[in-house]
Image: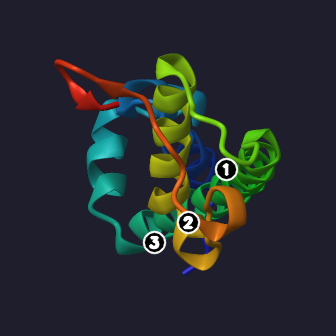
Amino acid sequence: MALTPEQEVYCQQRASGAGVAVSIRNADRSLETATIWNRNPAIAARIDELQADARHRAMRILRAGAERAAERLTELIEPGYNLGKSASVNYQAALSVLKLIGIAEAQSISGPEGGPIKIYTDPIMGDV
């Protein structure tokens, strides 16, 4: 079933994060109509489709940024260099992001000569 132009506006608004009231107002319809539309499988599918496109674009941007960060981290690590507390925290945060989006598993990030990267060890907190 093809959506009306008003339904498409509603779907685009909802997919972009707008609430029901704002979305239905921008589609020039009533809240009662929103209740009906929210039960419509075609509208739910269109919102899902729009959100999937947005997720895909966001992941592509995030992945590109993470790859640049991984390259930069690799450049910054000198042979035998011991990361200080601040750099160590930033490194661990960056590595967590890389693991989250699947880059750290695809690329090995290591220290000098393929060995482990030395991190700052706080006497109270342990490895930071």
Q: Earlier in the sequence, mark 2 or mark 1?
A: 1
Q: Nearer the viewer, residue 44 or 60?
A: 60
Q: Disc 2 designates what residue?
A: 104
| Quadrant showing the C terminus | top left
Left or right side of 51 for 43: left
Q: Disc 1 designates what residue?
A: 62
Q: Residue at x 51, y 59 (%)?
A: 116
Secondary structure category for the residue under label 1: helix
**The disc labelled 3 sits on which kind of residue?**
Ala
**Residue 48 in picture, x, y percent from top left:** 47, 65
**The disc labelled 2 sits on which kind of residue?**
Ala
Cα distance in 3D space between marks 2 and 1? 13 Å
Cα distance in 3D space between marks 1 and 3? 25 Å
Within-10-Å neighbours for mark 3: few <14, some 14–19, many 20+: few
**Residue 91 in picture, x, y percent from top left:** 55, 38
Q: Earlier in the sequence, mark 3 or mark 2?
A: 3
Q: Earlier in the sequence, mark 1 or mark 3?
A: 3
- Quarter location, residue 31: top left
Left or right side of 97 for 35: left
Circles 3 and 2: CB atoms closer than 8 Å? no
- Quarter location, residue 124: top left
Residue 68 against residue 28 in the figure, above or below: below
Q: Disc 3 designates what residue?
A: 45
**Residue 74 in picture, x, y percent from top left:** 75, 51
Q: Nearer the viewer, residue 122 or 101?
A: 122
Question: Can you name the residue that lies furthest to the front here?
Answer: 80
**The disc labelled 1 sits on which kind of residue?**
Leu
